[in-house]
Amino acid sequence: MRLSVLVLLSLAGLFPLLSRAAIDPKLLLIEQKLSGFEDKDYGAAVEKALAEFEARTGLNLHPAGLKACGLKVSSESGLGLSTPKALVRALTSALTRRGFTPKSIIVCDANKDSLRAAGFLPAAAAPDQSFEGLPVIAWGDHAAVWAKDPQFCFYNQVMPKPNAPSVPWGDPRVSILPKTLMDEVDFWINLPVLSDSKSLGISGAIASASLGNMVNAERFTDNPASAAKVAVEVCAVPKLSKRNTLTILSLERYQVLGGPSFDAGWCRSEKTILCSANPVIIDFVGLQKINSGRVASGIETIHPEPPIFATANSDEIRLGTCRPADITLVRLPAP
C-alpha cells in the first residue's frame, strides 16, 4: 500500500462499486458531507449516516439489555481540538429517537481535567456535573476501584516517565481499562479527532479507542517502539472491541503537524464526517488527509507508513482492513 495515494484517489477510484446487500460492518465506510458545522447541519447528516449504516449492515443502534450506550469523546487536546459538541448533540438526538433516554447516553473519556478543559464538564463548583443533561464519566475517577478486578488491568513492562505520580493500585506497569464500556453499555461509539502523533504516526480512531481509553497510558506516548503494539492490543480486547459498534470522525477540525497537542496554525477543516465499524480504514483515510494537508503547506509527508497499519492486522489480531479495494464506500451528499 503506497503512502503517496492521496485521499482523492483512494475515495474516488480505489473503492469497489456499491452493493445493496447487507455487508460486514468492518467492510463499510460512509463518507457523509455536511452543509456546515451548526447543530442543524450535524443533526441531519448524522441521522442520514446512521440510517445508512443500519440499512447496509443489518445492525441497529437501539437499546438492548443494559439500555445504555457510551459516546467516547476525545478531549486530550483541550477545547481547540476535541470532539465537536454539535456531533455529540446530533448523536444524542438520533439515539433518543431510537429509544435511549438522555440519562442512559454516557459521555466519557479518560481524564476529568481534559473533559472540563474541552467543555464536556462545567466548572468543578457547578452542582450539575453533566454535559447538557448527559452523564459524564472520567475513567481516572474510577481506576483505583476497577484495578481490583484483573479483567480491567492491562499489563505491559513499559514504565512511566521519571517523576510521574505513583498509581494508587501500586504497579506502574498496569494501565486500567474502562469498565463502563466493557460491562455497562449495550454499545459505544468512538468519536475521535484527527492529528499526527509522534508515538503512533497518526492519532485517530485507534488511538482514541486504546491509549485514549485507559488510565496510566501516558507511559506509552513517548515510546513509539511499543505504542503501536499496545494500541492494537487494547483495541482487540474482546469485551471492549465487541461493544465498539461504530467510529464517527468529524473533519471539522484536524491537525496536520504538531499533534496531538493543539496548534491552530496547523489545523485544517473539511465539511465531512466518516463513519465505519473499522477504525483502521478511518485512520488510513485520515492519514491521506494529513499528508494532503502537508503537501499543500509544503512540508514533508508522514513517510514511511506508520507501523500501526501493519500491526493492526498481524498475527491473530484483525482490527480491520485498510485496503481500499476491500472496502465498500458509500458517499452521501449533505442533507
Image (cartoon, rainbow, N blue to C red):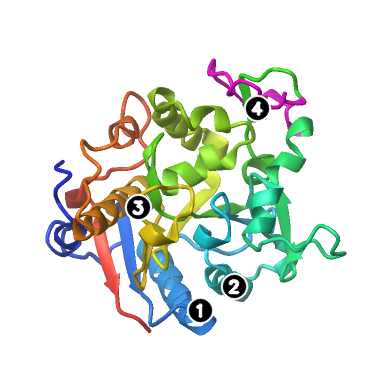
* Vertical position of residue 316 compared to residue 212: above or below: above
Is 138 displayed left or right of 320 in the figure?
right
Of pointers 2 and 3, the one earlier in the residue sequence:
2
Mark 1 and 3 residues: CB-CB less than 8 Å, in contact? no
Task: Look at the numbered disc 1 and give the secondary structure of its residue.
Answer: helix
Position in image of residue 114 (x %, y %):
64, 51
Most common secondary structure along the magenta stretch: loop
- Which comes before the other along the chain, label 2 or label 1? 1
In front of the other: label 2 or label 4?
2
Q: Mark 2 = which residue?
A: 89
Q: Is residue 150 above or below residue 104?
A: above
If you read the primary sequence from the N terminus, does the residue marked by circle 3 or circle 4 appear first?
A: 4
Q: Amino acid at mark 3?
A: Ile
Residue linked to disc 4: 151
Is residue 151 one of those drawn in magenta? yes
Residue type indicated by callout 4:
Gln
Q: Mark 2: which secondary structure?
A: helix
Measured as percent of width and height from the top left, residue 269 is found at 36, 68
Pick the front one: 125 or 307:
125
Q: Whole-percent x and y of residue 167? A: 72, 25
Q: Quadrant of the C terminus?
A: bottom left
Which residue is outermost to the top? 157
Q: Amino acid at mark 2?
A: Arg
> Is any atom of residue 185 visible in this view?
no
Q: Residue at x 42, y 64 (%)?
A: 253
- Distance, label 3 to label 4, CA atoms, is 28 Å
Q: CA distance from mark 2 to mark 1?
A: 8 Å
Q: Residue at x 56, y 32 (%)?
A: 218
In this picture, residue 29 sits left or right of residue 176: left
